[in-house]
Amino acid sequence: MVADGCQWWVRRFQNMAHYFDAYRIDHVLGFFRIWEIPVHAVHGLLGQFAPSLGMTREEVEGYGLRWQEELFTQPFITDWVIDRIFREHANEVRDKYIEKTWGNRYKMRPEFDTQRKVEAAFKGMETDKDIWIRDGLYALISDVLFVRDHKDPNKFHPRISVQLDFIYESLYDCDKQAFNTLYNDYFYRRNNQYWYQEAMKKLPKLVNATRMLVCAEDLGMVPDCVAWVMDELRILSLEIQSMPKDPKVKFGHLGANPYRSVSTISTHDMATLRQWWDEDWNRAQEYYNTMLHQGGPAPHPMPGWLAKDIVERHLTSPSMLCILSIQDWMSMDERLRLADADAERINIPANPKHYWRYRMHVSIEQLMKNEDFNKNITELIVRSGR
């Protein structure tokens, strides 16, 4: 698309500008880099960012880790790992799926050495035991400290979330510390300038194509360069209190929202306010006491007065825009909202059977006639100055 100046996008936005004043870029990080998963993998843990700057052996050693290619890039399979994953099925796994290499280490047999091969071998096998062994084999195969670069075999990437795996557990404390420093540098700093340049090849063409206001979903593993680009191009950020961008806090402080932002409670891919409240009672209790400054136990399910308090706090944030889903607006009215909070969810990204099924249970005409609901919203908006 860059080769022709992103003309397809430019024309699309210019046409949209006849109808809209603003648009949202979903997962803006995709303009900086994407997550590339090899075809032999079933799960995403063996992926890597593309484009990205892989690390040489010498760079890895510069962090204090002595490079051991086979140990770092091959699945970490030992007896204690096998016993912990497979328990009573451990001997069956040793006999059928893995073979000894050296010392107390094993490797996958050639016919099972990728997740796709394992997937094919277990096709149609759906007993609890089969799924247990299949998923355990997937986990064995992805238990590596580094993945080899897809284009340059002499460069490597730290495997994402490897701190939760057995190979990381096996490291000495000093090696864990060195790896953590390397890991944080790689995912949050190493590629900053490179990814900044990648985004600036594309995003300015889109933003400058029209006078529409642009906001972006900038959640997830967000490197520093994302803020650089968004600030330079005057793109509004997305601020969700339950997903703070500051890793040192559990909940975002609404008063700290930047002006150039969109404040919201939930998105189409998240639980609604009422669902979130009942997902984790301990987390809801902490929010109730520390953010809402309420004493005593948090009420469940969420009463309308409490939903109204949360909505009002979002409206009074300094964000340029506050855009709330209709479900979160209706959560304030116990007579209007659905009895079943779970029926309000729009999309569950990890569940292919739960997508975009939500439909409003009242019509626009019915909402327009609901004087109490409209008066409530009007008062909140007037008080907030929006």
Image (spheres, rainbow, N blue to C red):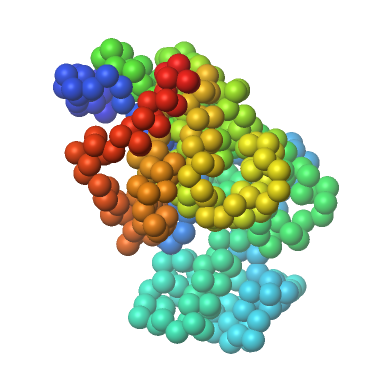
Describe residue 364's horizontal placement relative to residue 224 as left or right: left
- Residue 232 in percent (x, y) is at 47, 13
Q: Nearer the viewer, residue 74 or 197?
A: 197
In which quadrant of the rendered image does the C terminus lie? Answer: top left
The residue that appears at 71% across and 48% down in the rendered structure is 296
Quarter of the picture containing the N terminus is top left
**Image coords of residue 280 (percent x, y):** 59, 55
Q: Is residue 48 visible?
A: yes
Residue 290, picture quadrant: top right
Q: Name the residue: 74% across, 59% down.
A: 169
Q: Residue at x 34, y 18 (%)?
A: 213
Left or right: 82 as drawn, with respect to 22: right
Residue 191 appears in view: no
Q: Closer to the camera, 160 or 78?
A: 160
- Say which of 160 and 340 sits in front: 340
Give residue 72's position: percent from left, percent from top.
Answer: 66, 55
Whole-percent x and y of residue 7? 21, 22
Q: Residue placed at 28% from the left, 12% from the top?
A: 211
Asked whether 210 or 65 is in front, the reply is 210
Q: Is residue 347 above or below residue 241?
A: below
Total marks shown come to: 0
